[in-house]
Amino acid sequence: MATAFTRRYCEDSAGGHLQFTFYCDLCHRAYTAPGVEAPSEQGLFQKWKLQKAYMGAFDEAQENAKEHFNRCVKCERWVCDEDFSPDYGLCVECDRSNGKGG
């Protein structure tokens, strides 16, 4: 199993597509990265091709999803824009605990 940058993610491989959804580490708001077509070839190396396609799709989805999340410099959680204070580079929980947020 692949390791995601967020604490929670899920995958959907229905309909011949590989698609991944990543969740904010605070509020669990979801972002679903664009899907990619899964290989449909049959044969000797099918499992290997599927694993390679899965990891490639996962890596691509993560890079895409990272544009929609921010990493807190204090607790290192990945959070959505709504849970991030860009002035200090902190998630809203760390911002509040530092007495900077409202």
Image: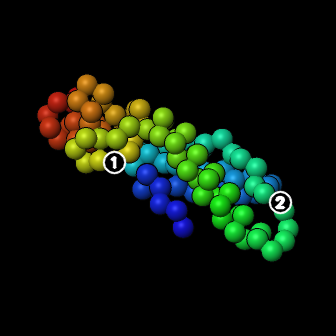
Q: Position of residue 69 (x, y in %)?
A: 43, 38
Q: Which residue is mark 2?
A: 40
Locate the C terminus and report the quarter of the image it occupies: top left
Circle 1 is placed at which residue position? 77
Secondary structure of the residue carrying numbered label 2: loop
Q: Residue 70: horizontal and vertical position, in percent?
A: 38, 37
Q: Disc 1 on helix, strand or loop?
A: loop
Residue 61: x and y in percent read: 58, 46
| Amino acid type, mark 2 | Ser
Give amino acid for label 1: Arg
Q: Residue at x 58, y 46 (%)?
A: 60
Which residue is at 43% across, 51% downward?
5
Please identify the residue farthest to the right as the structure is shown. 42
Q: Residue at x 72, y 71 (%)?
A: 47
Label located before the other in sequence (2 or 1): 2
> 85 or 42, which is in the foreground?
42
Q: Quadrant of residue 35?
A: top right
Residue 80, placed above or below residue 45: above
Quarter that holds the N terminus: bottom right
